[in-house]
């Protein structure tokens, strides 16, 4: 490949200008929220809007104190991490079998799994609500975890299937010839080779579960509410609250946005089911 | 394969948990929803029960909110798809060629997609669209215009704006990824032959992007049919039904009116619509599976 440093032409300058203007406009709301999180409530609604100010951390303390932020953050963490681990545990064996022992039905099974992902969540709302209520599992972390697992499972199987398919079968065969058991084969040969793919599959599942809002809003209340549900409580105005809302939001999204940056490639593959590479 | 039995039972065993759990996840709610949709089932009137045939369906479809909700769903879906695809193509092409800081710019551009929908919605509702203190109001005042009360006067448009902002990074990301697999030599050759940018766009870029565009349209169709959190946290479907879509209407009937029978009839309606979109996507993805 030839690498040549682009010469500075008027065209390049124009393109740079346009690209950065568009980027800054589109990123503005998020950047503005991040700024507001460090303002006082009065500064947050200043007219004209304040760009320069002395930052304060008090909003973060108030958010924790008033709405018990850590409780919701912990719920988000528990549900999304458990769903990811549980999902990987169920999806990996399935993807392994499909990739290395494909049968005539494999393709159909994959397509069918994909189709379950396309069911609108609201289609399952009434039954899930009734079942959860009957078994005393409304507003429960367990219910939420199971739902998060099931709703990301198709994506995980698909992504892991793609990861495993790229591993030459001969390597596994060789290990088996040497007398490795299935477990040894998976742990000592497959796992090291597929680690990157497994990690990014897990990361995507984590991002999707963390951000899930439909089931959190409809099935949880104070006990099992996730951050998505906590933020929704800020919907109706109560005095001055923009700085606090921003602080709560910033805490809720910062880690996951960073994860998102790292998992963009997998996101494209996972969400398009490999149709775009 | 020499051992005949192992490669048959073991793979099945390994797939069983995934297949069975997804089978349950699909069948049980579907069967229950179908059942609920044919009985009288209101949590507020538990004494009224019994099979009522298609009455719930009739009630759902003749509800004065039904047609507005269908129309809003279509408008929301259509506009967001148009905005995100057109802008996404623009962003993809704009950032395809190198410029200073391209890496950082791309990271900033795709960030909104990783933000949970309730945060997105409230950020816009309060800090951007508030008619007095919101940033948009300040911009309007700066240009000497009367600030707009976005969520009250243009509720559906506001939701379209919020959802588009959130999904634009998705479309852009897909197009950016797809553009990376363009045949650079072919492009170079076209340039050498003096093809204008428009000609390159028409004969090279757009044909290459036609499949990603189709994928984006179908995936957004499936996800945008169920837009919920953005409406729930901003307008609650109002004023009156101005920003109610089918998903929100079903939610209202289920968890605000507690009429699970009618809501179930509506849910089946939503499932059927989603399946129509899904069939096309599955066909397209399936071709890729070989």
Image (cartoon, coloured by chain):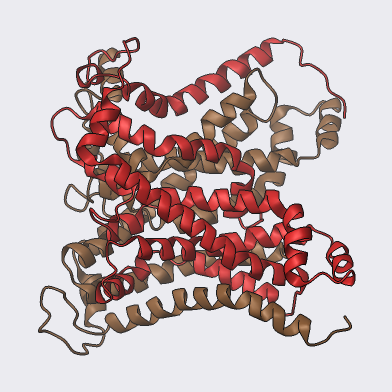
Chain colours: A red, B brown
Quarter of the figure with residue B262: bottom left
> Could you say where residue B284 lies in the image, as x and y percent from the top left?
64, 62
> Could you say where residue A155 lies in the image, as x and y percent from the top left?
57, 60
- A145 in relation to B189, above or below: below
As drawn, is B90 to the left or to the right of A141? right
Image quadrant where one finds the N terminus of chain A: top right
As drawn, is A122 to the left or to the right of B78? left
Q: Nearer the viewer, residue B111 or A141?
A: A141
Q: Is residue B135 visible?
A: yes
- B13 in relation to A250, above or below: below
> Could you say where residue B88 lies in the image, as x and y percent from the top left?
55, 38
Q: Is residue A277 visible?
A: no
Q: Residue at (41%, 61%) from the top-left corner?
A: A145
Quarter of the figure with residue B79: top left
Quarter of the figure with residue B142: top left
As drawn, is B91 to the left or to the right of A277? left
């Amino acid at each position: 490949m030839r690498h040549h440093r682009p010469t500075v032409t008027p065209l390049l300058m124009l393109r740079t200008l346009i690209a950065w203007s568009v980027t800054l406009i589109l990123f503005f709301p998020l950047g503005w929220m991040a700024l507001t999180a460090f303002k006082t409530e009065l500064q947050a609604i200043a007219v004209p809007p304040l760009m320069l100010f002395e930052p304060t951390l008090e909003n973060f303390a108030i958010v924790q104190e008033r709405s018990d932020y850590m409780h919701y953050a912990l719920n988000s963490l528990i549900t999304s991490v458990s769903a990811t681990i549980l999902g990987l545990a169920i999806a990996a064996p399935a993807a392994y079998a499909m990739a290395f022992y494909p049968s005539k039905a494999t393709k159909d099974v994959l397509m069918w799994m994909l189709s379950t992902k396309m069911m609108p969540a609201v289609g399952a709302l009434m039954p899930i609500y009734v079942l959860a209520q009957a078994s005393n599992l409304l507003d429960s972390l367990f219910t939420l975890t199971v739902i998060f697992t099931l709703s990301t499972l198709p994506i995980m199987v698909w992504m892991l299937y793609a990861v495993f398919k790229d591993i030459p079968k001969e390597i596994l065969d060789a290990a088996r010839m040497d007398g490795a058991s299935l477990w040894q084969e998976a742990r000592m040969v497959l796992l090291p080779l597929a680690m990157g793919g497994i990690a990014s599959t897990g990361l995507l599942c984590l991002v999707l579960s963390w951000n899930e809002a439909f089931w959190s809003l409809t099935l949880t209340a104070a006990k099992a509410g996730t951050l998505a549900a906590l933020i929704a409580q800020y919907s109706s105005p109560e005095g001055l609250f923009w700085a606090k809302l921003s602080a709560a939001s910033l805490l809720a999204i910062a880690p996951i946005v960073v994860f998102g940056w790292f998992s963009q490639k997998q996101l494209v593959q996972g969400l398009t089911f490999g149709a775009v590479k | 394969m020499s051992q005949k039995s192992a490669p048959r039972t073991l793979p099945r065993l390994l797939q069983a948990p995934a297949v069975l759990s997804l089978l349950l996840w699909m069948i049980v709610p579907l069967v229950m929803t179908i059942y609920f949709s044919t009985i009288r089932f209101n949590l507020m009137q538990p004494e009224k029960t019994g099979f009522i045939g298609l009455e719930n369906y009739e009630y759902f479809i003749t509800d004065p909110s039904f047609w507005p909700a269908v129309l809003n769903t279509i408008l929301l879906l259509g506009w967001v798809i148009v905005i995100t695809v057109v802008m996404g193509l623009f962003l993809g092409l704009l950032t395809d060629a190198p410029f200073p800081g391209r890496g950082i710019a791309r990271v900033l551009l795709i960030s909104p997609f990783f933000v949970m929908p309730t945060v997105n919605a409230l950020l816009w509702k309060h800090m951007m669209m508030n008619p007095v203190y919101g940033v948009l109001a300040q911009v309007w005042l700066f240009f000497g215009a009367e600030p707009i009360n976005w969520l009250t006067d243009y509720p559906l448009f506001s939701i379209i704006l919020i959802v588009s902002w959130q999904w634009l990074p998705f479309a852009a990301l897909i197009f950016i990824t797809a553009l990376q697999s363009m045949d650079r030599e072919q492009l170079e050759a076209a340039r050498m032959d003096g093809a204008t940018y428009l000609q390159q766009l028409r004969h090279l870029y757009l044909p290459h992007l036609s499949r990603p565009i189709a994928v984006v349209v179908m995936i957004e169709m499936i996800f945008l049919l169920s837009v919920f959190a953005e409406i729930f946290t901003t307008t609650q479907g109002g004023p009156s039904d101005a920003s109610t879509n089918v998903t929100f209407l079903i939610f209202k009937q289920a968890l605000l009116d507690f009429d699970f029978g009618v809501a179930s009839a509506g849910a089946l309606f939503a499932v059927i619509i989603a399946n129509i979109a899904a069939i096309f996507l599955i066909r397209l993805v399936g071709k890729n599976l070989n």
